[in-house]
Image (cartoon, grey):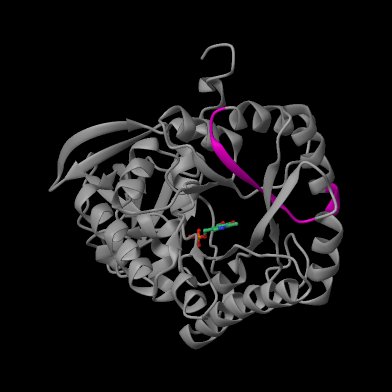
Amino acid sequence: LVDRSILERNLAAMQTWADSREVTLRPHAKTHKSPAIGRRQIELGAAGLTVATLAEAEAMDAAGLGDLFVAYPPVGPWRLARLGNLMERAKVTVAAGSVDDVVSLSGLGARLGREVGFRWEVDSGLGRLGTGPGDPTVAAVSRATEQSWTRFEGLFTHAGHAYRAASTEEMDAIGRREGEAVVETAERLRDGGIPVEVVSVGSTPTARSAARVSGVTEIRPGTYVFHDATQVTLGVAELGDCAQTVLATVVGRPASDRVVVDAGSKALPAENPSGRAAGFGLVVGRPDHSVERLFEEHAVIRALSGSDLRIGQRIRIIPNHACTTTSLHARINMVEHDHLRQVLPIEGRDWRGIPNRERR
Ligand code: PLP
């Protein structure tokens, strides 16, 4: 379920904040994978969308949301072929974190007969992809910009390690460092005569602290649309900010302190991104209940002081990770004050729905 009024409030809050800082908002659509929600983000003022997968990109483009940053390396012939298809219709910029990535994009550009825009990934501490701030990035981008049929647009980074911060202070410090890493590197590139248009940062916990660094031009939070139990644990959101819940039915009450519901790991992600959550989700309205164990089709909820829940009763669970929850479900049931208002297919997770060149 997604509560529409909470969703709308979250969308508006981030857009208002971005506007007040005069930074562009390019939300990461991997959280909702839904063109209907992507459209609301654009209507409210987002400059375009970020995506991770080509299925997300194709679903957004098919809905007319064709200004996309594909924040994933263009590795593999199938990715390049689908990027090429997409580029015939949409305005697409692609992530690159190695010179090999840019060589691949150069080949694609030559085939298409036009330049392919790329953004270089700076590793501001996550330790996933990209090159370190300063010298390593300056050296790599200098080589990357020698590739024909490509256009270097700027730098991006994602401080996902903020999810493991031990305190709000540490989280904000990671955000500041995230912003400084790209701003300082962009300055070095400009000093060397390489123009840098876009300086992009963002995760939900760090979008604001990173964007306070002057010189940042864009933020890319994703999870903020729904928030989740992890954001609550981190102090980034409150319970009332969580728009997405998993609706579950009590299927067993085998002991006074044990409730079993029909939402296992195929409905609720078995993740704990911060390492700090007490279980696998928060039971709405019952702070003393904890989602202790997940099986595929069952969740075991522990209620230490006993539970009033009855077999057949429905409860809502705020998952630990909103984005993975979306990818586990086929549709979003949009609710308002407990009434179902709309059923939205999650088009961006369905690779079979790809509108290919022939079908268009
Ligand atoms: N940008 C990139 C490259 C990401 O990988 C992610 C999340 O994984 C985001 C932005 C959005 O971060 P969050 O999910 O914290 O909103």
Q: Residue furthest bottom?
A: 169
Q: Position of residue 123 (x, y in %)?
A: 71, 68
Q: Position of residue 129 (x, y in %)?
A: 74, 59
Question: Image point 72% across, 61% down: which residue?
Answer: 128
- Ligand 1 resides in the quarter of the picture at bottom right
Q: Residue furthest front?
A: 193
Please state if 134 lies on the left or on the right of 216 as rendered: right
Please state if 127 lies on the left or on the right of 329 as rendered: right
Up the image or down, 134 lies above or below 298; here it is below
Please state if 115 lies on the left or on the right of 345 as rendered: right
Nearer to us in this view, 257 or 44: 44
Nearer to us in this view, 122 or 298: 122
Q: Image quadrant of residue 256?
A: bottom left
Residue 112 lies within the magenta run? no
Residue 99 lies within the magenta run? yes
Please state if 75 lies on the left or on the right of 160 as rendered: right
Up the image or down, 106 lies above or below 345; here it is below
Nearer to us in this view, 228 or 183: 183
Nearer to us in this view, 208 or 169: 208
Q: Position of residue 93 (x, y in %)?
A: 62, 46
Region of the chain picked out in magenta, as a range:
89-100
How many numbered discs? 0
